[in-house]
């Protein structure tokens, strides 16, 4: 077990492609940290640099007390789980789990103890005599994780390990990985492009874009207080609604001029936004803060906005409403019930205590304290 520290890490591929730029991060001992971002943002390259599979262009990587910039991958005392399982098809599950330990010349008794302990942790004891072709995708992924566990490394690295599984298995394996982390209490760094995986797995999330860190923090902190428009749009399902318009002075406060309506901004944001009056901004509100009915018995500041329902998308206990005003299109996420149909006029309730206002040029969230 060990902390992992990255200081000013940069990776440049020939001829001059900057994949990771000035990356600074400290992963605490026993922390489950998730790197999340769109394809090509540099998250897998960062993981591969920690593993030693990719040389760094600039910066320093420490695992525990040791600088590992020039240490070969096999000597970094880390274990990596890949997207494609990378199991040996001609070997049984037992031999796949034991193979790395045999190469390191561990005693046979210790190999057997470690293999059986890992198999017990992962619930694959009955699979030890099978070969990979006789396993399901979820079972193969457990074996791949088990091969990492037997190493008892200082840190585990996961490179999109669930992306080849179907939706049901992904949910099951997310729960298994959470239980595994709680049980073995080892540092884990996990890469994914799936923000649902990031939100459900990570003690902290690192949101990346174009090789740079956009925000680091606990999942709910990032969800509730995104630092910029990119983070706000990437984290959340469905994604946050963005409406272009202007801030205007309104009844002693500040409001957003939507194009067909003037939406007052919560009084708690007014002091931060006064300097942006009469400037172009982007108004953000999450679909779950757009309701088809005003709150009852709650002290919530709301604004009623006239819309037209373009599409109703039922999801069981919830439904997604595709809404339209003469100026904008956006989504609402509401409880399922009858009475809403395509094409009807609907007055929706916006929770103005939950809105975000972004600088139209920089994307900065203007509703956050400057030191947030």
Image: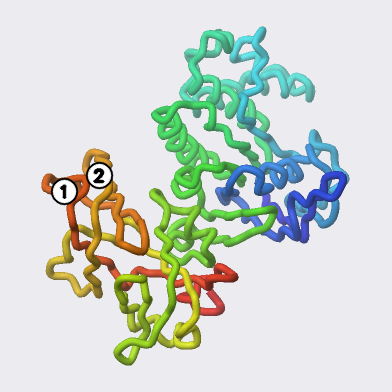
Left or right: where 300 falls relative to 233: left
Q: Report the residue at 61% width, 30% height from top.
A: 83
Residue 266's quadrant in the figure? bottom left
Residue projecting furthest to the bottom: 252
Which colour scheme appears in the figure?
Answer: rainbow
Residue 312 image label: 2
Residue projecting furthest to the front: 326
Instruction: Answer few, some or many: residues within 10 Å of disc 2's Cα (few below 14, many 20 plus, some between 14 and 19).
Output: some
Q: Position of residue 123 (x, y in %)?
A: 46, 23
Left or right: where 355 falls relative to 72: left
Q: Nearer the viewer, residue 221 or 283?
A: 283
Whether pointer 2 and pointer 1 mark residues with C-beta atoms closer than 8 Å, the reply is yes
Query: Along the polypeptide, which appears first: circle 2 or circle 1?
Result: 2
When the figure is inspected, residue 323 is found, relative to residue 225, above or below; the finding is: above
Q: Nearer the viewer, residue 302 or 167?
A: 302
Give the alpha-carbon distance from disc 2 to disc 1, as whole Å: 8 Å
Left or right: where 95 falls relative to 348: right
Q: Nearer the viewer, residue 310 or 282?
A: 310
Q: Report the residue at 67% width, 19% height from top.
A: 98
Q: Position of residue 31 (x, y in %)?
A: 57, 51
Per the image, the residue denoted by label 1 is 340
Count of all numbered marks drawn on residues in the image? 2
When the figure is inspected, residue 186 is found, relative to residue 329, above or below; the finding is: above
When the figure is inspected, residue 48 is found, relative to residue 335, above or below; the finding is: above
Instruction: Answer few, some or many: residues within 10 Å of disc 1's Cα (few below 14, many 20 plus, some between 14 and 19).
Output: some
Q: Report the residue at 49% width, 37% height from top.
A: 177
Q: Position of residue 213 (x, y in %)?
A: 64, 59
Q: Report the residue at 30% width, 73% height from top.
A: 261
Q: Nearer the viewer, residue 230 or 104?
A: 230
Q: Secondary structure at mark 2?
A: strand
When the figure is inspected, residue 34 is found, relative to residue 26, above or below; the finding is: above
């Amino acid at each position: 077990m060990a902390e992992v520290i990255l200081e000013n890490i940069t990776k440049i591929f020939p001829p001059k492609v900057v994949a990771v730029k000035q990356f600074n991060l400290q992963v605490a001992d026993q922390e489950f940290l998730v790197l999340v971002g769109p394809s090509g943002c540099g998250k897998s390259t960062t993981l591969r640099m920690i593993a030693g599979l990719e040389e760094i262009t600039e910066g320093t990587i420490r695992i525990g007390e040791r600088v590992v910039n020039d240490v070969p991958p096999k000597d970094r005392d880390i274990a990596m789980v890949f997207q494609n399982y990378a199991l040996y098809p001609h070997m049984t599950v037992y031999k796949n789990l034991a193979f790395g330990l045999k190469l390191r010349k561990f005693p046979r008794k210790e190999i057997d103890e470690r293999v059986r302990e890992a198999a017990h942790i992962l619930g694959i004891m009955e699979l030890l005599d099978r070969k990979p072709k006789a396993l399901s995708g979820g079972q193969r992924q457990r074996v791949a994780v088990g091969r990492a566990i037997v190493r008892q490394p200082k840190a585990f690295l996961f490179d999109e390990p669930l992306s080849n599984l179907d939706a049901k298995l992904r949910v099951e394996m997310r729960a298994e990985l959470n239980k595994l982390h709680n049980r073995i209490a080892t540092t884990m760094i996990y890469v994914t492009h799936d923000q649902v995986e990031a939100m459900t797995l990570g003690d902290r999330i690192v949101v990346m874009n174009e090789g740079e860190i956009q925000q680091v923090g606990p999942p709910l902190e990032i969800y509730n207080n995104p630092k910029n428009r990119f983070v706000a749009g990437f984290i959340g399902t469905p994604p946050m609604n963005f409406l272009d318009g202007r801030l205007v002075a309104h009844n002693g406060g500040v409001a957003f001029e939507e194009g067909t309506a003037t939406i007052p901004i919560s009084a708690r944001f007014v002091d931060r936004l006064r300097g942006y009056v009469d400037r172009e901004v982007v108004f953000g509100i999450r679909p779950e803060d757009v309701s088809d009915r005003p709150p009852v018995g709650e002290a919530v500041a709301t604004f009623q906005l006239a819309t037209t329902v373009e599409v109703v998308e039922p999801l069981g206990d919830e439904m997604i409403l595709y809404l339209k005003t003469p100026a904008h299109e956006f989504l609402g996420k509401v409880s399922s019930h009858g009475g809403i149909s395509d094409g009807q006029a609907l007055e929706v309730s916006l929770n103005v205590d939950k809105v975000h206002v972004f600088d139209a040029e920089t994307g900065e969230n203007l509703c956050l304290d400057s030191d947030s």
